[in-house]
Amino acid sequence: MPHFSPFRHAGRSLRVVAGSFIVAAGLLSAGAASAEKLTIIVGGMEKQIYLPAVLTRELGYFKDEGLDVELINTRAGVEAENELLAGAVQGVVGFYDHTIDLQAKGKFLKSVVQFSQAPGEVQMVSAKFSDQIKSPADFKGHTLGVTGLGSSTDFLTRYLAARAGLKPGDFSLLPVGAGNTFIAAMKQDQIQSGMTTEPTIGQLVKTGVAKILVDMRTPEKTVAALGGPYPAASFYVQSSWLDSHPEDAQKLANAFVRTMRFIASHSAAEIAEKMPKDYLVGDKDLYIQGLAEGKAQFTPDGRMPADGPETVLKVLAAFSKNVQGKQIDLSKTYTTLFVDNAAKTLGN
């Protein structure tokens, strides 16, 4: 019988295991090199206006592009914008209007994929005050809720008031976030009117707490309220990051454009099935109803709508001292290059 040496076999086993670790480490290293982590901050992940971000993740489109993407949440677009400028994240899912507002301050952001062609926002009025506030002209003397000061709801609320002939001192703005905090502020009479999105809109209407005053969930209603198309939810980045990371930007654009095509070709119910269950806020039917009513806000292909940037600039210039009198180069606030490339890759 041959002599058995446990040490000899153990040594061989260790060499095999060590070799396996080296191979595994090499594979992990290669994977890490091809999928650098990208962090995208969303100005309210539970809001239907920003649904494309979470839907892209749930459909697996980021992974299909070889991307390692982390989505993190914040309650207002202005907070997301600050994180981007601080370099804490690579991109933001927020409203396009921030690119114009910040260019006026000498900071350059660029929308890469345009998710919506309407804000998806609704100006609500408390049922207790619906006899007093029948239009934005009646905002005078009242407190209006916005997600955050300097947010897009702030911008749009100020514009609705200005268009109705009111001055900045005629009303007050109170940052109340969205969802439960917005609903609580309305119930407690901290605000008499306020701007919010689905699924909060549906909850307020169903419970009788508030009524719809100005609806901006479709392109047609947006034109009536604002005087033109208003591109809103988008994926934007710092221009300097875009210049230095074109490959990452293209992969992200490919993933997002696939999602916009999915939204355009599927029903609200089919889309809701793909979303995390907690996003349905305990009422799936109400979530689907709100999505069906506002689905027209989304672009079918991720492209910037014609004349959209001009309308946004007009809205901001109507009330913002920051923008008034400034030369804004709209061509530097968005690009269609990556969306056009995505269309070629995915097939028109």
Image (cartoon, rainbow, N blue to C red):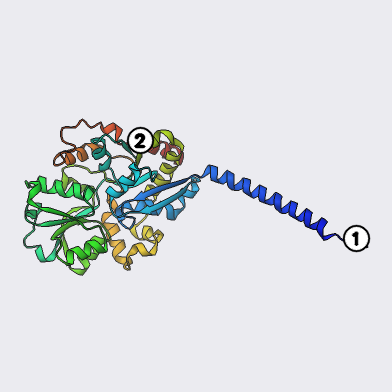
Q: Residues within 10 Å of mark 1 (few under 14, many from 20)?
A: few
Residue 322 position in % (x across, y down): 18, 38
Do the CB atoms of the residues marked 1 and 2 lie less than 8 Å apart?
A: no
**What residue is shown at x 27% (from left), y 49% (from top)?**
297
**What residue is shown at x 22% (from left), y 58% (from top)?**
176
**Label 1: which secondary element:** loop
For marks 1 and 2, the one nearer the N-term is 1
Q: Can you tell which mark lies on residue 239?
A: 2
Residue 240 lies left or right of residue 290; in this view the side is right
Q: Amino acid at mark 1?
A: His
Q: Amino acid at mark 2?
A: Ser
Residue 263 position in % (x across, y down): 36, 52
Residue 347 visible, this orientation: no
Q: Residues within 10 Å of mark 2 (few under 14, many from 20)?
A: some
Q: Image quadrant of residue 289?
A: bottom left
Residue 348 lies left or right of residue 318; in this view the side is right
Between circles 1 and 2, the one closer to the viewer is 1
